[in-house]
Image (cartoon, rainbow, N blue to C red):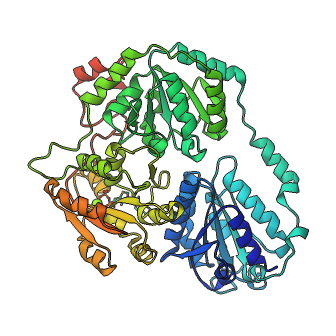
Amino acid sequence: MKLSDYVIDIIKSEGVSHVFEFIGGAIVHLLDSVASRDDIECVSVRHEQAGAFAAEAYARMNGKLGVAMATSGPGALNLITGIGSCYFDSVPCLFITGQVNTYEYKFDRPVRQIGFQETDIVSVAKSLTKYAVLVTKPEQIRYELEKSIYLAQNGRPGPVLLDIPMNVQRADINPEELPSYFDSEEYMEIKAEEQDDLKESEIVEIINMIRNSQRPLILAGGGVRISSSQKQLAEFVDKTGIPLVSSLMGLDVISHQNPLYCGLIGSYGNRYSNLILANCDLLIILGSRLDSRQTGTRPDTFGRGAKKIHVDIDRFELNAKINVSLAIKSSLNRFLVSINDALGDFIKPEINQWLEKIKDLKDRYPTYSFEPEDNEVEPNRFMELLSSKAERSRAVCLDVGQHQMWASQSFRLSKDQRLLNSGGMGAMGFAVPAAIGAALSTQEEVLVIVGDGGFQLNIQELDTIVRLKLPIKMVVINNNSLGMVRQFQDLYFEGRQQSTVNPNPSFIDIGKAYRIPAFAMHSMEDKEELDRFLTTDGPALLEVILERKTEVHPKLVVNRPIEDMYPYLDRDELQEIMLIDLVEEMDIPT
Ligand SMILES: Cc1ncc(C[n+]2csc(CCOP(=O)(O)OP(=O)(O)O)c2C)c(N)n1
Ligand SMILES: [Mg+2]
């Protein structure tokens, strides 16, 4: 059979129904192999970067595999930001790039290029993939394809890249006769390496630690979703009665209506969430890499009154940034299943005082940017309102900036509602294409929350949304600036707005140009516009206008411990709240 047909067969057998792509001469054979099939579709995006983000969101929603394809040279290079995003956020995606024919590829010759659009994409992508390879011979295809897909999905998931020259794509093969990765020694070695290191004695030890704790807390990270363990987590929370905070990537691991849910921690976390973390005496960290956006720049002060347990599939993340009492290399799924089994009829520890303290902190420190006068839009209250009306959206895709933080602090996710962020890469331009992938994966409505800046990074995808008639509702939070950086300039650059404030086009007119119904909210009095926007069939756009100066509050400033966010609490007030010693003022560098 034709090699490109075989590749599509395998992709289909992985449960993939949509391939995100932008065509070019070097990828025509592969896309042509989709043309005659009705069980798998090409989604022609308007920029390869958008295709990569869409594939990422597709994989995150279906939990299996996302696929994006591009031509050689510029097409392949345009995928790179999305590939990196999958790498940092551990998303299983297969990227396939076309390459010039092997007989016009330079290989080791000391020239820059031989074939037109020839680019050594494998070298470029190496540091951002679990595996990247140029398939130089048709006989390698079965092995390399099986290996790539296996690596993408197993261990700590991530992206892989196959670069397939045109003459290889069109070759004739008999897959049955080709070597299989699953027969190789290499495969056996990887399997052995991926073994969990979880001992029964450790489970017993953890249960004892829970029993003896007065103020236990779970910190849930993105690993819970990556390992599809949200049900097991809910069971663990239910059986133990332990409250839970989350990282940005862990926001959608549990319904925010669950009374034990205690919000987002970190640099832009809720003040109450950070205070809860700072006061716990046992911290169970599940599938989180504890980056500095979570811990602040003072990891030595993070959860300093607590014994810490860290479970992660990637052993290199353990004891890397925060030293813990117990580090366990295990898939979260296996860990949670084991501990839930061992808990049996566990009698929940008596932690009412702790739960009361938590309730008091939640009531005392609700997260708002400012006290609104008249009916002006205050972003945190707007996010609360939006979430109360957008429960039917299957996923919420955030871009990067202030709007992302307001949403992460205040959008109340309902049960099973997903939240997709570009976490580690923090790539502006993520939200709109991610919504395309999420909508195609679920065939359900998806909500986008994006800034006026980030919206314009992949604005061309409005065309893809309209062409495919996708039910995507886009909220553009327009503060007429690259607000997150502008806020940073206010803090550290005496308010000089270099490059952060440039006039915007009319978003309402842009909506019209793409034939997308567009609405605007200038104040909370315009709630009807919000309702009209949400009840419009198919795609719709809502521009929400904010004052340029609106800030994200609270914010953790460099060198401060997690409980001490700006605007600062009165020292006596902080002292009264804290159940452990404050960090000495003289120990905080200025
Ligand atoms: C591709 C990319 N370029 C630059 C940045 C740096 N950056 C982070 S947030 C931000 C401002 C975002 O502005 P906007 O989309 O309007 O959102 P706002 O902060 O105003 O809500 C910038 C420039 C980035 N994260 N990604
Ligand atoms: Mg903005």
Depth check: give the residue in front, 105 or 47: 47
Q: Is residue 355 left or right of residue 522?
A: right
Frontmost residue, 272 versus 532: 532
The image quadrant in which ligand 2 is located = bottom left
Between 499 and 253, which is closer to the camera in this rendering?
253
Which quadrant of the figure has residue 341?
Answer: top right
Seen as rendered, the residue at the extreme left is 374
Horizontal and vertical percent position of residue 25: 63, 86
Q: Position of residue 407 (x, y in %)?
A: 34, 49
* Whether residue 19 is visible: yes
Examine the rendered structure and indicate whether residue 477 appears above or below residue 586.
Answer: below
Confirm whether residue 499 shows in the render.
Answer: no
Q: Give the quarter of the image for residue 365.
A: top left
Q: Quadrant of the C terminus?
A: top left
Q: Position of residue 309 (x, y in %)?
A: 57, 26
Tell me if residue 173 comes above or below residue 194 in the rendering: below
From this view, report whether residue 195 is shown above or below residue 213. Answer: below
- The answer to whether residue 479 is left or right of residue 69 is left
Q: Quadrant location of the N terminus?
A: bottom right
The residue lying toward the viewer, choosing from 350 and 284, is 350
* Residue at horizontal 44 percent and vertical 49 percent from the top: 417
Residue at 47% x, 26% y is: 217
Left or right of residue 1: residue 512: left
Total numbered labels placed on residues in the image: 0
Question: Where 586 sits versus 195, above or below?
Answer: above
Picture coordinates of residue 62 (x, y %)? 57, 56
